[in-house]
Image (cartoon, helix red, strand yellow):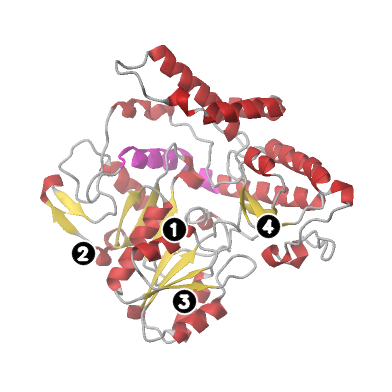
Amino acid sequence: MESVEGNNSAVKVAFIHDANKLSREEERHENVDENNSDRFAITQCIGETDTHSDALITRYAHTLTNYSLRNLGYPVNQDFNYEALAPLLQFHLNNAGDPFLGSGFSLNSMKFEVSVLDWFAKLWEIEKNEYWGYVTTGGTEGNLHGILVGREQLPDGILYTSEDSHYSIFKIARMYRMQCVKVASLISGEIDCAQLETSLLANKNKPAIINLNIGTTLKGGIDDLDLVIKTIDKCGFTNDQFYIHCDGALFGIMLPFMKQALRISFKKPIGSVTISGHKFLGCPSPCGVLITRLKYINALSRDVDIISSRDATITGSRCGHAPVFLWYALKKKGLTGLENEVHNCIFKARYLLNQLRGAGIGAMLNEYSNIVVFERPLDDNFTRKWTLASDKNIAHVVVMKHVTIEMLDTFVREFVQERYVWYKDGQVQPLCIAKDVGSKNCACSIHKLSSNY
């Protein structure tokens, strides 16, 4: 089977030989140790000794290594190496202000930031003199900014988003006190355009601000941008009556490298796109990128003398290290490297789907997705061990670059073994998850799994 190459090869070898031999006692000890907050209390008036602090950090790093070897449920790429950037950690880097105008604070990385923004602008097909953007703290801040731009353009606009949208969208609606219409989703997780049409027609007297998911959080469903645009047009909305924000947290950087996948492009009538930098690219701290149209920014901008720049971002002070991490990752990987990583993740996701279904476990995988959805494990300890994300009767694995075939094999083997106990050797039947993943992907006694996958 295909293997994943990377800078963490030594760690991966350790995984194959040792990681999954952790006994329940060791795991329990880890949990107890980490939950003992007294060990981390800051109590000494004269300061701690280096020996004591170093020991805590060493033990914490060991714990994190073990956790990362079983990190399957969250879209975070653990396979990265930024050791070459270590000299920058002795500096406070702050990118307060507009990255295109610079700042009065000279310890910034705005040149790196603009290079990163130019790369994403080219990826999403918008000319350099037509876009504006910045490096954010993550997908939520990108959503905050994108939807704010939409609201400033259309102050009385109604926010439309699918029920499968990231929780930040509904939080943003509350924060901005916007009327929010939650639109039904299809089984895949993508927005139901028939329902969207009904909602738009019911509120045709008000502009529409539409959040589209370029990969939903739980199922990896991709909202059909082209069909949404056709739906808006069918409902009679002109270009000055709607605004589309694309939440591309994970897939926004993946889809451009897959043939026949949805094309994210500013040549279409969209207003903004955001991604999370720490997800597919991998980064030590959360970060993201927001790109919007330059013509929208004046409504948000204010000149600020004290930083000798313009304030157009959500936060004031911004991490100056994040743009350098992103710049370094893009430079090292290149377009060919990124394309290979995308296809490798898709290959491994399909492998996991086949392994689960082959073992009689209900599972679903959307096209162009690396998120495998399956029946939720009955044991919360098993879910925590593998860091699975779950909701009601389903859970998922997000197959990132750091996830190896060996890790997936071990996960499936343990899942099957535990499932044998949960379902009492066939005496108890698995829960029906047909309403979540479709009847052909459900392994309950009524539906059974379809052989056509």
Q: Where is residue 32? Give x, y as percent.
A: 58, 28
Mark 2 residue element: helix
Find the distance from the CA under tag 2 to the CA under tag 1: 25 Å
Q: What residue did someone put label 4 on?
A: 393
Mark 1 nearby-residue class (10 Å; few <14, some 14–19, many ≥20): some
Q: Secondary structure at mark 3?
A: helix
Residue 173 percent across, percent down from the top left: 39, 66
Image quarter of residue 79: top right
Which residue was labeled with disc 1? 168
Q: Quadrant of the N terminus?
A: top right
Q: Nearer the viewer, residue 255 or 246?
A: 246
Category of crowding for the residue at label 3, using alpha-carbon neighbours closer than 10 angstroms: few (below 14), some (14–19), many (at least 20): some
In the image: residue 372, left or right of residue 173: right
The label number, if any, that marks residue 298 in the structure image:
2
Circle nearer the viewer, 1 or 4: 4
Question: Residue 144: image x %, image y %?
Answer: 36, 59
Could you tell which of marks 2 and 4 lies nearer the N-terminus? Answer: 2
Sequence-wise, the earlier of marks 4 and 3 is: 3
Q: Is residue 434 above or below residue 286?
A: below
Give how far apart the Cα atoms at labels 2 and 4 are.
46 Å
Task: Name the residue located 43 percent from the left edge and 31 percent from the top edge.
Answer: 82
Q: Magenta residues, as a range? A: 319-340
Nearer to us of marks 2 and 1 is 1
- Indicate which disc residue 229 carries: 3
Q: Which one is in front, 401 or 215? A: 215
